[in-house]
Amino acid sequence: MYLQHFGLNQLPFNLTPDTEFFCDLPSHLEALNVLLIALQSGEGFIKITGPVGAGKTMLCRKLLNELPAPFVTAYIPNPDLNSVALHQTIAGELGIKYARTAGQNRILAQITDYLLQAAAQGNKVVLIIDEAQAMPLKTLESLRLLTNLETEKQKLLQIVLFGQPELDGILQKKTIRQLRQRISFSYALQPLNKRQAQDYLQHRLLVAGNTHTDLLSPLGVAALNFYAQGIPRLINILAHKALLAAYGKGHGSIGWRHVQSAAADTDDTRQRLGLFCMRKVFPWLLLACGISIFVSLRWPL
């Protein structure tokens, strides 16, 4: 609805993990470098965590696109599986054909054969698991056993876990301590600060076709990051709604009032309504009170 009004070619704040919109923010770029370095060095387990909406799936998709040959990838977006289903899913992702009546041991043997052949051809197989905190404990243990597959020179399978902070708590459980000890690289994504939020917003708008740097007012950017608490997904939701609000009123830029309207319409940000205004107005109120006290003491009635 607002594309032509704001000079856009496409929606800038979609929630789908479109890697065209990937922004080289410090935290995300560092995480991607950690992943690439760890995988190049042949590490068995790597873990990336971050709060809901921090950009883990976007980073995951970026990694899938960035890994060059000889890497071969398998991707599991929903790992709430038992051990049998896990092996079936991995086999399917790697293109391994198995009989529908095949048992777990048979499928595991086929996976092992595939990994040995891949290693003989100089390929490196990487299993990438999103939302890893959803995996049952027994499935996590089955995952660990897969990393026992190795030659004298290398691991036959490298595994990258993307998960919410709850994953760290799960890995502290005594029953899977062996898996925790095998995680050689880990990184925690951080929320965006105000400057990073501004870069993020401008980047997405530029990719979407907007060339005007004044589409978002400084207070609008500050309000977006304040209400979203630096979480990219929430920033996207609020920015989209703020654009709709501005378009509906015929405005050409996004101010803090448009963002406040968006926050009032969003469950995860509604509880912070009013706090942004107080944060901006309070210093001026404090200054006015100070001046009033000074005047009353300097020139008493």
Image (cartoon, rainbow, N blue to C red):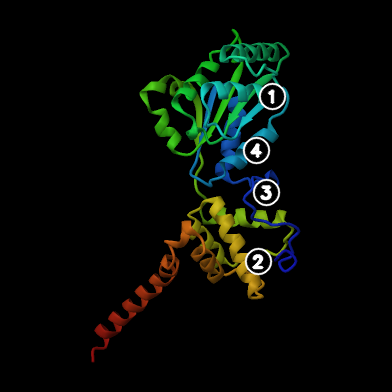
Of the 4 image quadrants, the one containing the C terminus is: bottom left
Instruction: Give residue 271's position: percent from left, percent from top.
Output: 42, 61
Instruction: Give residue 178's position: percent from left, percent from top.
Output: 43, 19
Which amino acid, by three-letter code, is at mark 3? Answer: Phe
Disc sitting over residue 21 in the figure? 3
Quarter where residue 11 is shown = bottom right
| In the depicted structure, whether residue 37 falls above or below residue 213 | above
Contact between labelled residues 4 and 1, with CB atoms less than 8 Å apart: no
Q: Is residue 2 left or right of residue 286?
A: right
Which amino acid, by three-letter code, is at mark 2? Answer: Leu
How far is the residue under mark 2 from the one under mark 1?
Answer: 42 Å
Of the 4 image quadrants, the one containing the N terminus is: bottom right
Residue indicated by mark 4: 61
Q: Secondary structure at mark 1?
A: strand
Q: Secondary structure at mark 4?
A: helix
**How many numbered dots are placed on residues in this image?**
4
Residue drawn at (56%, 40%), measured in percent from left and top? Answer: 56
Q: Secondary structure at mark 3?
A: helix
